[in-house]
Image: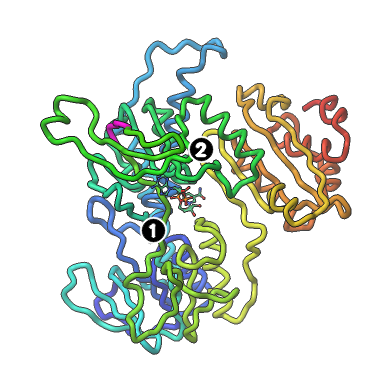
Amino acid sequence: MSKKQDKSFDVIVIGAGPAGYSAAIRCAELGLKTACIDNWNNDKSLVSLGGTYLNAGCVASIALLESARIYHSLNNLKQHGIQVAKVTVDIALMMQRKNQIVDRLSRQIADSFIDCNVTYIQAEAKLFNERQIEIKPSDQTTASRLEAKHIILASGSSPIDLSCAPIDNEFIIDSTMALNLDSVPKRLAIIGAGVIGLELASIWNRLGAETILLEAQESFLSMIDQQIAYDAYRIYTNQGLDLRLGARVISTKKSSKKASLEHSRKVTVNYQDNNGTHALEVDKLIVASGRRPNTENLAAAEADLLLDENGYVHVDENCRTTLPGVYAIGDITLLGPMIAHKGIEEGLFVAEQIAGFHNPVNYHLLPSVIFTDPEIAWVGQTEQALRAMGEPINIGTYPLSATARGLAMSQTEGLVKIIAHADTDRLLGVHIIGTQASEMIAEAVLAMEFSASSEDLVRTIHAHPTLAKALHGAALVLKNQAYTSTSSVF
Ligand code: NAD
């Protein structure tokens, strides 16, 4: 922040997570005088741009997941004829590597801000009337006001607290702290088998923690295609995850200091299911029961920003709030799910809208990924949703175990499922569970962006041998060419 602070901008962005930093950089690229205000400090009290996604979410999570995957695979090398004497894990070094990745990417954002002339202001920001923003630096000493022709709200989200499991940052922790543990808990429970709960379970289970997931819903991953969910449940359970569905946590009790010295277990989790009430003793409890938008202190009452009863900012399909010149993007709206690339696309869209262009986000073709091992990725509609709408559909599935690449990699768990309209053959949904599903889904997104048919996928030459051949195989099966799929060199 320069000593003599500019007070007036074309655009002020509140929040430097993926939605906010993309918006700010694109605005500046388009010649708009732009400021971005953010108050994130890392555990060393240093500025760290990138929001939750970078500092305490996806990036930190995939860095640790990769370490856990390598550690686990080293214990399973016998089939390759490789003997490893003793594999040990140094959690402190693992965390250091993760932190270095986070720092590097955060610096990259800061460098882009400098290169594009985005004014970065480290402070807490609040929206007032007439697109005025009050900023309070972290020392809380002097508040001052800025103004802009356009404001973009991108303040992100935070973990939802559960009154039955209050966070103490020691034994009962949230998803942020769960990416910063200094040792592998012997026995770990996680409240919530949603995306975050499963990603954290995948990390710590692979590093050796006995991991129990307590999920209040009876169904598993109800938002994804249920054939994939069924396979995921089977694979995770075989990996040793203890998945308890219909298990609603009602209270927790920490052991007294004396008791926790005598016993190894630190927390008792009480939960209810159809069979009654149960008590589970664990060393650590992670609360991953959902996220809420960060809008509590985002706007002063006089600004009259319209929120719904859960705190989400009311927006139209162009991310415009009810206030003229004020936009909201990313996790604080209900336009699409809470995923980083949705926020990024909205950031670019709003920046271009302000500059006079109209390139809207295609919410129908947002890919989703669960970064477990194996990964789950999908785009478009599920079989269940399409059947409920009465759409005539054709389906093709292909297992990774039938691909040469999957076999060579010893990555044979999972499948690709393609759904096309029965009359037009247009692709309506692609669902993948398997290693590198997050990479494979890109082909499906591109195909669907171009309104491809399953025939187009069949006619597209896929390199051999690759995992993407499973996508090709599923298209062949859909077109009743199952024998071609197995007889061609897959
Ligand atoms: P979620 O809503 O997906 O899952 C939380 C789960 O906790 C729910 O299934 C709920 O039934 C359960 N739950 C709540 N209270 C409970 C209780 N008392 N006992 C037992 N179970 C309970 O939320 P999340 O996993 O925290 O994720 C939050 C958001 O962040 C989601 O929108 C998710 O898509 C997004 N996210 C996405 C990614 C990604 O794209 N890879 C990564 C992280 C987060």
Q: Position of residue 303 (x, y in %)?
A: 37, 84
Disc 2 residue crowd, few under 14, some 14–19, many 20+, Cα 10 Å: many
Residue 419 falls left or right of residue 331:
right
Q: Which image quarter: residue 149? A: bottom left
According to the picture, the residue beneath numbered tag 2 turns out to be: 372
**235 in magenta:** no
Q: Quadrant of the C terminus?
A: top right
Q: Position of residue 220 (x, y in %)?
A: 55, 41
Q: Secondary structure at mark 1?
A: helix
Asked if 42 appears above or below 319 in the picture, the reply is above
Q: Secondary structure at mark 2?
A: loop
According to the picture, the residue beneath numbered tag 1 turns out to be: 51
Kindly indicate whether the residue at mark 2 contacts the one at mark 1 (C-beta within 8 angstroms): no
**282 in magenta:** yes
Kindly give the residue lying farthest to the left in the view shown. Answer: 258
Q: Which image quarter: residue 141? A: bottom left
Residue 170 falls left or right of residue 25:
left
Q: CA distance from mark 1 to mark 2?
A: 22 Å
Q: Position of residue 309 (x, y in %)?
A: 43, 70
User: Can see residue 232?
Assistant: yes
What segment is highlighted magenta in the picture? 280-284
Task: In the rendered structure, find residue 210 and report the number of the disc placed on it.
Answer: none
Three-letter code for the amino acid on which mark 2 is drawn: Thr
